[in-house]
């Protein structure tokens, strides 16, 4: 029951913060993204030489557009209709799809790469989504996930739900979303259980602090060598 209420709270928060989030991304208000993580995820995707990318939890669509500028066909889905509306206003292929729908098989087209860029915030639902991804990536395909680095999150190093925060963001944001913290060992065990195999682990560094700004997992289907 806790998982369901927390997952619902995540969605409520994002529905409420469509406008400030869109503005923050498009006006480069998030320093860590501008300095490190945006380029890191683009580079990690391009390194896989994909022809067709699905951005799962695409938000206002910046990554789909960045990939299009580099000649990569990309589509985005998100559970928040307001974010999809903002994405469509700037062009590109976007659609509304909840993670529950995705996990149940609503997306059926095989792709070269599925990307989750800071978009895996929940608990059991994330496992369901990853299991679905394992069936979608084609023979040489990859899943690329960027998330907070577990060792540098400032949280106790044990799995569990955490309270959200908009610290460092503008005062326009409200009702921060909760999120589920996983240790590195838990991430790796979850990937294996969902039918995915770690191919590469990337730790983009913050030049100012010298600490990883995030962690990026590059995954294949576990049966594909």
Image (cartoon, rainbow, N blue to C red):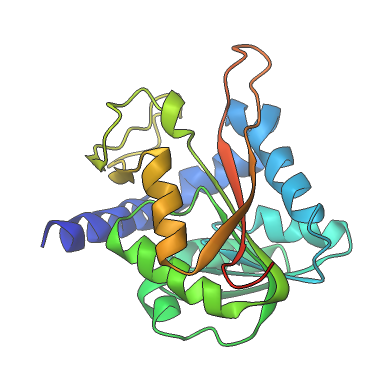
Q: Residue 177: in sight, yes or no?
A: no
Give the residue displayed 39% in from the left and 29% down from the top: 171
Give the residue displayed 67% in from the left and 53% down from the top: 62
The vertical placement of 174 against 5, above or below, is above
Of the pair 34 and 139, the residue shown nearer to us: 139
Is 60 on the left or on the right of 75, as rendered? left
Is 177 on the left or on the right of 52, as rendered? left
Q: Position of residue 108 (x, y in %)?
A: 57, 87
Give the residue displayed 78% in from the left and 58% down from the top: 48
Q: Position of residue 158 (x, y in %)?
A: 26, 35
Q: Position of residue 221 (x, y in %)?
A: 59, 69
Of the pair 224 and 210, the residue shown nearer to us: 224
The vertical placement of 30 against 146, above or below, is above
Q: Quadrant of residue 142?
A: bottom right
Q: Quadrant of residue 168?
A: top left
Q: If the image is split into quadrants, where does the N terminus sit?
A: bottom left
Give the residue displayed 45% in from the left and 50% down from the top: 188
Residue at the far right: name it: 71
Q: If the image is split into quadrants, where does the C terminus sit?
A: bottom right
Q: Position of residue 38 (x, y in %)?
A: 68, 40
Q: Quadrant of residue 26?
A: top right
């Amino acid at each position: 029951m806790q998982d369901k209420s927390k997952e619902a709270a995540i969605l409520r928060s994002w529905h409420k913060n469509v406008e400030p989030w869109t503005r923050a991304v498009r006006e480069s208000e998030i320093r860590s993204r501008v300095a490190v993580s945006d380029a890191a995820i683009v580079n990690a995707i391009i390194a896989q030489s994909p022809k067709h990318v699905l951005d799962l939890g695409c938000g206002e669509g910046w990554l789909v557009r960045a990939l299009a500028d580099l000649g990569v066909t990309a589509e985005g889905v998100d559970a928040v209709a307001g974010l999809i509306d903002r994405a469509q206003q700037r062009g590109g292929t976007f659609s509304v799809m909840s993670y529950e729908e995705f996990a149940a098989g609503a997306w059926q087209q095989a792709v070269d790469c599925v990307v989750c860029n800071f978009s895996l915030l929940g608990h059991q639902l994330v496992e369901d989504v990853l299991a679905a991804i394992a069936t979608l990536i084609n023979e040489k395909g990859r899943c690329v996930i960027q998330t907070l680095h577990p060792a540098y999150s400032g949280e106790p190093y044990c799995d569990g739900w955490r309270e959200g925060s908009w610290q460092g963001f503008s005062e326009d944001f409200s009702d921060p979303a909760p999120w589920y913290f996983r240790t590195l060992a838990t991430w790796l065990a979850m990937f294996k259980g969902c039918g995915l195999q770690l191919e590469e682990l990337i730790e983009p560094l913050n030049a100012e602090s010298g600490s990883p700004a995030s962690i990026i997992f590059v995954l294949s289907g576990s049966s594909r060598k």
